Amino acid sequence: MTVTILPREKTSALFNALILFGSLLAGLVAVGVVFLAKGINPFFAIGEIFTASFGSAFGFQETLTKAIPLILIGSGLALAYRAKFWNIGAESQLLLGAVFATWIGLKFGPGLPAWAILPLMFLAGFIGGGLWGLIPAIFKVKFGINEVISTLMLNYIAAEFVKFLVVGPWKGETKYGYPYTDDLPTQAILKHLGSTRISLLMLVIAVCTALVLAFLVYRTRFGYEIRVIGENPEAGRYAGIDFFRTSLIMMFISGGVAGLAGVGELSSIHHHLSYPETISAGYGFTAIIVAWLGRLNPGFSILSGLFFAGIIVGGDAIQMSMGLPATTVNVFNGLILIFLITGDFLLNHRVRFQRRVL
Amino acid sequence: MKRIEKLEMKGICKSFVGVKANRNVDLTIEKGDILGLLGENGAGKTTLMNILYGLYMPDEGQVLVNGEPLHLKSPKDSMKAGIGMIHQHFMLIQKHTVLENIALGYAEAPFLFPQKYMRKRIEEYSRKFGLEVDPDKKIWELSAGEQQRVEILKALLRNADLLIMDEPTSVLTPPEADELFEILRKMIGEGHSVILISHKLEEIISICNRVMVMRKGEVTGAAEIKDVTKVDLARMMIGREISASYEKAALEPGDPVLEIASLSVNSDQGLPIVKDFSMTVRRNEILGIAGVSGNGQREMVEAVTGLRRAEKGTVKLQGREVTNKSARTIHNLGINHVPEERIKFGTVANLQLFENSVLKKHHEKPYSTNMLMNYPLIKNHADSIIEKYHVDAASINVPVKNLSGGNMQKLILGREIASEPSLLIAAHPTYGLDVGAAEYIRKELIHARDRGGAVLLVSEDLEELFQVCDKIAVMFEGRIMGIVDPSDCDIDDIGLMMAGTSVGLKGEKN
C-alpha cells in the first residue's frame, strides 16, 4: 500500500469548521481513553470538567480569572505564529513583565497614587516582556539561531533569575524567610470585582488587547508585512520589507503582551513576586494551544482562552473529586494540541491510501 | 554484468498537461562518448534525461541498451541498468562524512567491517579516476567541486556506466571545471560514457565528442563536434523563424532612465558573474537582453533592483545613484520588477489574491495610509487586474496557491505593469504562457514604452525580443558582447555574440 500526500487546493469555511470541531472531538475521545484506562467513566469525568468550570457561578468566576492571562498571551503568540516565529517563551516573557512591574511597584508605589502607579507598572511590564522577547528575535535574524530552542532556553534563565531575586536581593523584609518579595503597596494592587478574584480592569485589557492585535494583523500595514514574511520570506525581500525591523517589532509586541499578563498575575492575584511556578502556572505553554485553537487569529484567542481556562479549572476540580494527579490537565491539553495540529495538516493536505498497482 | 556498449532512445514523446515537452526525440550514445545536450531552458533536455533516469515514463517511444529494450519504471531500474545521474543540486547529507554518504544505500557492503570495505573501494576508485577526496571529511567542509566528486564516486561505485550530468560546471570555479573535465576524460578512457547537459557552448566544444541540440521539445541538430563550430550550435539553439516586429509608434528615445556603469556582481557561489557591465535604458525605449541563460542576466537584474549586492560599479535611476540601496528605496523611485522566479519571489501562496495584488506596493498610497491598509480599495484594484489581464480565478478571495501558474503570472504582470512605472524590468515575462496571453503581455510592454516608460526585457526567446525591442543587447559571461537594432541586423551576428564572439556590427549604436 502506498500513502500519497498532496496539498489541498480549496478549503471551504464549513470544512474548516468541521475540521476544527472534529479535532476537538478527537482530542476529547483520546482524553476519554486515558480516563478509561484509569478506570473512570470518561463521560462522567469530561462532563464534570465542564460543569465545574462553566456550570456554576463560582466555577465560572475562576474560569474568567484564569482566562485573562491565557487570552493575553494567546493573542500575542498568535501574532508571532502568523510571522512563523515559533515563540515558546511566553512563560519567561510573563515572568520578566512581573519582575519589571514589581520593581516599579515597590520602588515608586508608596509615593504615588493608584492612577499613576498602575499605568507605570503596566508600561514596565510590557517593556520587560518585550525586551525578553527581543532576545530570540535578534538571535534568529542576526545569527540564524532557531527560535524554538532559544525561547525555550530563555524560559529556564528567566525562572532561575526570578528565583535568585526572591531568595536573594529582593527577598522581602516582612516575609520571615519565605521566598517572596514584600507585598506591593495597596495603590499598586488591582481591585477585584466583588468577592471574586477577577480584576475587571485586567479582563478589559485582555479582551481589548486581543481585539487590537486582530486589527493589527488584518487591517494594518504591519500586519500585512508580518503575514508576508511569515508565509514567504523571499517574497518579503522582493517586496522590500525590512525583515529585521519587522521581526523585532513583532516580538516586542508578542513578548510585551505576555508581560502584561505577568503584571496582572502579580498585581491582581499574588501581590508580590514569588517562585516562578507560583506566578505563572504554565500559562505561557497553555497559551500556545490557545493560539492554535484560535486559528492564529488573535481575536479568537478570547474564545479559546476561555475554553482552556475552563479546562484548567475543571481539571483542578476532578483532581480533587476523583483523586487524579495534577498533571491530568497537561495530558488533556497536550492531546488536544496534537489533534489540532493534525487537523491543520488535514486541512491543507489530502492523504490518499492506495493499493500499489504494478 | 554486461556493460553499456550502446544506448538508444527512440521516438520519445512526453506531454504534460497540454505542453509537449518531448516530441519524437531520438538519442544515441556509445561507449566512450561524451555527448553534449544543448538547449535553452524549457527545450526539453531535463524531461528527456528524467525519462532516461526513470523519473518519468514516456508517453511513446523506448529505451534500448545494447539493442535490448529496457523498462525504466523508477531510478532503481536505471541504476540497475548502469545509468547514473548527477543533479545540479547535490543530493548529499551535509552533516555526514564522505564515506557515510557513499555508503548510504550501498547494498554490496559486507555486514562486518563495512567501513573498512567502503574505504578500500573509495580509495580504489579515487585512484583510478583521479577523484581525490578525503573520505572522513564532512560534506559541509567540502567545496562545490569536491562535493561533485563525491557524487561522481557514488555513481561509479554503483556501477554507473552512463553518467548523466546536469549543468555540472554551473557551481564550479574555472579551475575546478578543468579538473572535472580531466576526470571525465579518464572515465571515458575506462569505457564509460557521459551525457553532459549544458548551456555553455565553449564547454561542449572543448570536452564533448558529439552534440545534440534541442529546441521546443524537438531535436534541431545532432553532430560530431569536429564538424561544427560554436556559431552553428548557437544557430541550432535559437532557431531561424524570426517573425515581424509588432507595430509600434516611431519614438525617439528620451532621457536616460537607468544607467549602469562598470557593474560587477557575484553569483550565489561568490564567483564573479557580472563583470564590468555597462548599459543605458532610456524613456520610450525597450531594451532587450539576449543571451544563453546563466550568463549573469539574473544577477544583473537582482543587483539593479536591490536584491543582490553590487561589488563594483554604479547604478543610476533618473540621475540618482541607487547602487546597493534597499529594494524598497529603489522601488519607490519608480522601478517595477517582474522577477524571474515569479512563484517564489512574486507571490505569497497562502495569502488571498487581493492581498497579493498589492505586494510591494502595499506601503504606498492609496493602498495604505497612516499604517492602515485600505482593503476595500485594494479589492477594487484586484478586481480590475483580474478583469484587465484575464486572470482566471474563482474570486479575489481565494489563496493564490489555488491559481494555475499562468494565472499567477498574469496577476504579477498586471500588478507590475498597471502602476505605470518609469522603468519596468521584466525577466522572461511570457515564459510558460499560452500564445494569446504572451501576445497580450508583449503589447502591454510596448504600451508601457509608448506611454513614456523605459522597459528592460530579459528573455531567452529571440523571437519575442525581435518583436518588441528597440535595441537588443547580447550578454555573454557577464558582459555585453554588442548591442544591435533588431530592424537592421543579421541573426547570425546574434548567434555569434551569444557564443562569445564579438563581431563588427553595422547596426550598432549606443
Image: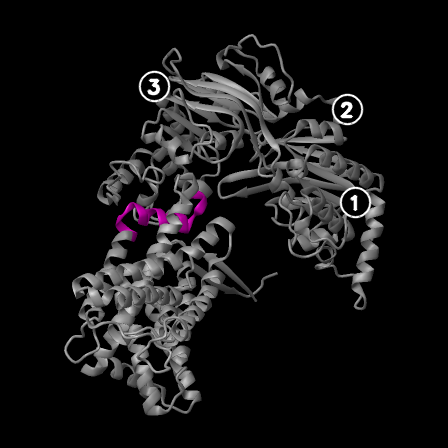
Q: Disc 1 versus disc 2: distance between alpha carbons?
A: 28 Å
Badge 1 amino acid = Leu
Q: Residue at x 32, y 67 (%)?
A: A98
Q: Nearer the viewer, residue A226 or B57?
A: A226
Visible residue check, residue B406: no
Q: Which mark is residue B452?
A: 3
Q: Residues within 10 Å of mark 3 (few under 14, many from 20)?
A: some
Pointer 3 chain: B
Badge 2 amino acid = Lys
* Tag 3 near tag 1, CB within 8 Å: no
Q: Is residue A259 above or below residue A142?
A: below
Where's residue A181, x and y in %? Answer: 33, 74
Q: Secondary structure at mark 2?
A: helix
The span picked out in magenta is: A217-235
Q: Secondary structure at mark 1?
A: loop
Q: Which mark is residue B226?
A: 2
Q: Residue at x 30, y 65 (%)?
A: A101
